[in-house]
Amino acid sequence: MFVLQLLIVLLLVVAAVATLLLQARSDRFQAARDRTLAAAEAFAHGPGLVDALRGPDPTAVLQPLTEAARKKGQVDFIAVLNRQGIRYTHPLPAEIGKKFVGTIGPSLAGRTTTESVHGPLGDEEQTVVPVTDAHGAVVGLVASGIKVSRVSSAIDRQLPVLLGAGAAALVLATGGAALVSRRLRRQTHGLGPAEMTRMYEHQDAVLHAVREGVVIIGGDGRVLLANDEARRLLDLPPDAEGRRVTDLGLDARAAGLLASRRVATDEVLPVGDRLLAVNHRPTDRRGGPPGSVATLRDTTELRALAGKAEVARGRLRLLYDASVAIGTTLDVARTAEELTEVATPRFADYVSVDLAPAVLRGEEPPVAVRGSAAEVRRVAVRGARDDHPLYPVGEPVTYAAPTPQATGFISGHPVLVPDLRTAVDWRTQGAAHAERVLDYGFHSLITVPLKARGVLTGIVNFWRTEESGPYEADDLSLAEELAARAAVCIDNARRYTREHALAVTLQHSLLPRGLPEQNALDIAYRYLPAQSGVGGDWFDVIPLPGARVALVVGDVVGHGLHAAATMGRLRTAVQNFSSLDLPPDELLGHLDELVGRIDQEASAAEGEPVIAGATCLYAIYDPVSGVCTLARAGHHLPALVHPDGTVRFPELPAGPPLGLGGMPFEATELPLPEGSSLVLFTDGLIEDRRRDIDAGLEILSRTLAAPGRSPHEICEAVLDVLPPAEQSDDIALLVARTHVLAAGQVAEWELPTDPAAVAGARADVSRQLTRWGLDDAVFTTELILSELITNAIRHASGPVHVRLLRDRSLICEVSDTSSTSPHLRYAAAEDEGGRGLFLVAQLAERWGTRYTSEGKVIWAEQPLF
């Protein structure tokens, strides 16, 4: 027995060594072919090869390149050929220009050719690859080859190793056979045929007792063995053993797998009403007999569980997508649309969202009474087609009390209608409407209320058509989850809408409601609030004594109620400071101190934000002199449009923003020609995230550069060009075109400091009023001027200047060089003086004092009838 084993081992070793030699030779030759193919392919597809072939001297260009590629590719030659097979390159320069030895016909047709030939270098393995241009045409060939001697020498070097390995294997096999024979004798303990038969019977019993099917198929495709579980799972006939697998009436897919040698691991096959997990392996992979063995497991229940798990994963994915996609904005309608976009078509074929009308205004809807109708408005609807019979967006809808929509909206609980055809309550909305819905193909409905933080805002309807199965009770939980996430976002948007409306209302209440009456300027303005939130931009037009007008533009950094309220406080402060007739630089100084005090109060109060920054531009225009006095606190320069259309931005001292303190403000006087326009604006007009301020100012300058336009036309032209598409900040724009009082509307006199001059002044004033046709105002005006002139002569020094202005009112001004301001007081009956200003206050509509660099001006206004 041992000798027989030794002979078998010897034959196996010899066969193995011979096989290895043959295989090594084959592998070496295949490796040589692969190397030549790689080298030829790489060079054939190299950049610039086509141009070189079409050039005047291909050899000069390609010879050094092929030699470099040959050395790197470790081949014996790389030759570039034209379509006639003439060599352009070769390691042997003498071979250049000669015809290539080998087959080139298939390569000229676009195929790659590999062959063995006897070439200039001897016996070679070579590959020919076509070279194509951008249009796919073959413009040349690249051949690469390696000498057979190099391959054979490598095989010869391996021969001793293989023989040595074979001898070692023979020695080891001989020793192993001896050990195995000895061990088998020891392990069988001399068992005879009977004992071995009993052992086989025991193994056969175990094979048929296991709950996993086992089928063994022979090399000829016949069933050699099938245990009881395999017969049950495959429903095999009693005489299945010995028959071909293809004759057993199995499913074609199952029979094909069992009759093949294909490896399968837990491949699921449908067999009847079962799903079987099949593992299939050939038996001769490790020297076994030809054929295959298959094991079978019933996975019908596992597949059902896997299907449920897949459905659960899909629902979780849908909920995740809903959490990301719903609520991206603080717009109620857009949030409702996002819900419909997420739910269709993965959960519903059509989705409609209805909200209470109060929700769209940012208010809380009234509490619905059980049994009453639900009044809502269609906000969003989405589906596969647009010709559906559902209510359109924007239409108010009143759902009758028994309908699922009214029931869900009032009760706050979802309602499932699995089959609309058999349901009765939903038809109470209208028979005609119900028939249109059914005819369209709707057959199942889930209505879920949108409820968040105890507020019931509306309902969402999930519809399915004939293309999908009906809703089941398990679908309610997913519908509720989707509605709950959307409800929170809708309620957030509702609250934002309410706060935004409050802030806008507050902001509008703090801005000017209209323009005051005055003749010095033609004024137009525009105010555009930000698309989201409200800011602190503001403007004002304030009439001042002496027919002058103050123009104000300011900006409080930030958005929201705090910015709007701060803006209101600053505007009120500017109006109060303007009533004192302060020059622009002094007014900004007082405003700066006010902002500093506001910040101190905010710092002392916990949780109240300080003013992060505020800017202001204050200008006073005098129509008598045509001079505009301006000062700014961190604000942008105004634009000045001359009557001829020339635009410039006058240089003004750049004061710090309000609230910083420590730096004085400086005013500048600008003479403005009559008919010129002064354009004041906030930074929201010129600043944008996608352009810098300089670009915005350049666009503004080009837009303003047109003569003869009214302030309203200028506003329209500017707002047609400059505001960004996504306006993130408020825009305040104020345009004022100047007028100058005519010479005939102004009368002036210079008086000495002599009481005797009063009588002459009264006479001059009387004559001037008569020329103006104001005879009725002569007596009153004489009394007012007499008191003012007498006061100036008595209490002041230097010359006294008298000026009459005829504008919307009659303005009397008396100026002197004193900085002492008179005060109104009530004189007692026995007092000799103190009644002058009291008399002026009684006769004039308004009176007051303003200070100049030379002294002061006391003025009084009388209405013109």
Image: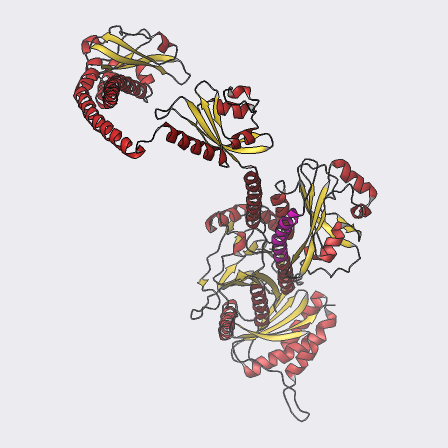
Residue 489 on the magenta segment: yes
Is there any visible trace of residue 259 in the rendered image? yes
Q: Magenta stretch: give its range.
A: 472-493
Give 94 or 275, whichever is nearer the viewer. Answer: 275
**The N terminus lies in which quarter of the figure?**
top left
Q: Residue at x 72, y 42 (%)?
A: 444
- Residue at horizontal 26%, vertical 7%? 101
Vertically, is 137 above or below 730? above
**To which quarter of the image does residue 372 belong?**
bottom right
Which residue is nearer to you in this view: 604 or 780? 604
Task: Point out residue 397 in the picture as x, y percentages from the top left corner.
Answer: 76, 49
Of 459 and 777, nearer the camera is 459
On screen, residue 428 versus residue 831, left or right, reads right
Predominant secondary structure in magenta? helix
Instruction: State the count of labels.
Output: 0
Identify which residue is drawn at 51% across, 68% down.
Answer: 609
In the rendered image, residue 435 lying in the magenta stretch gets the answer no
Q: Indicate whether 367 appears above or below 112.
A: below
- Name which quarter of the figure residue 815 lies in: bottom right
x and y, in percent, of residue 434 in the image? 79, 42
Q: Quadrant of the C terminus?
A: bottom right
Figure check: 163 above or below 402: above
* Nearest to the observer: residue 847 or residue 333: 333
**Picture coordinates of residue 781 (x, y %)?**
68, 74
User: Do we see residue 725 in this rendering?
Assistant: no
Left or right position of 712 against 433: left
Q: Residue furthest bottom?
A: 830
Above or below, 772 relative to 187: below
> Percent from the top left, x then y, of residue 4?
25, 20
